[in-house]
Image: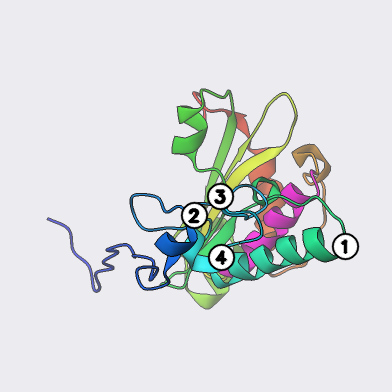
Amino acid sequence: MILGSDVLLAVGRRPNTDDLGLDRAGVALDPRGYIMVDESLQTNITGIWALGDCNGRGAFTHTSYNDYEIVAANLLDGDKRHVCDRVLGYALFIDPPLGRVGMTEAQVRARGLPYLSSTRPMTRVGRAVEKDEILGFMKVLADPSTKQILGASILGTNGDEAIHGILDAINAKTPYDQLRWAVPIHPTVSELIPTLLLGLQPASAA
């Protein structure tokens, strides 16, 4: 038996592409109805791009806006930006909130990558204790050879905000050992991140 106060039901989504006349233009769709695009967000038809939820490459407001940034930079500024360069982060605004970035542990394992892992409960976060919101945990995964952070999750109070520090570190390709001795502001949720990184161990021992 599982006791709870609420149920979150996620049934997925379907792109609203049926009535766009894409078949007349020859634009290819995948079996689920998403417009197929390459890494520059161009469809199979030269001169037609697909941005936002309809291309299945993010389905968030922030990724949709980044789609625009990629296409605009490539067309107007002569850049060569690609979707594969995007570090995907997202949040679930539940109680407590969840902030996520990068790969999940299942994705890392599926790729057969060696990795380090560290987990700390929110009971270790002074801010969470002060607010009496101690449910949840922090978790981070890292590559032992490159020292790059592969992914992280913060399920707990302010996790949707605190995750941005790790998102920025991944984007900047900052090795995790450079963050271990940072001096974060007290009392914040982010102040546990250096401690979390200090706890990185081979996954089998974590």
The image's colour scheme reads rainbow
Nearest to the observer: residue 137 or residue 30: 30
Instruction: Work out how far the residue at label 3 is from the one at label 2, CA to CA, in angstroms.
Output: 43 Å
How far apart are the two marked residues, 4 and 1, measured between alpha carbons? 36 Å
Question: On the image, numbered disc 2 is attached to which residue?
Answer: 137
- Which mark is nearer the camera, 3 or 2? 3
Between disc 3 and disc 1, whose residue precedes?
Answer: 3
Q: Which mark is residue 77?
A: 1
Magenta range: 159-173
Indicate which disc, 3 or 2, sits on the residue closer to the N terminus. 3
Amino acid marked by disc 3: Asn
Q: Quadrant of residue 5?
A: bottom left
Q: Nearer the viewer, mark 3 or mark 1?
A: 3
| Mark 2: amino acid | Phe
Q: Quadrant of the N terminus?
A: bottom left
Residue 93, position as x, y percentages in the image: 46, 73
| Earlier sequence position, callout 1 versus callout 2 | 1
Residue 159 — which label? 4
> In front of the other: label 1 or label 2?
1
Mark 4 or 3 closer to N-term? 3
Q: 44 or 205, which lies in front?
A: 44
Rendered image quadrant of residue 167:
bottom right
Picture coordinates of residue 14, whole percent (x, y): 34, 65
From the image, tell me which residue sits under label 3. 44
Amino acid on which disc 1 is placed: Asp
CA–CA distance in space, label 4 to label 2:
9 Å
Q: Give percent across and percent down for residue 94.
A: 41, 72
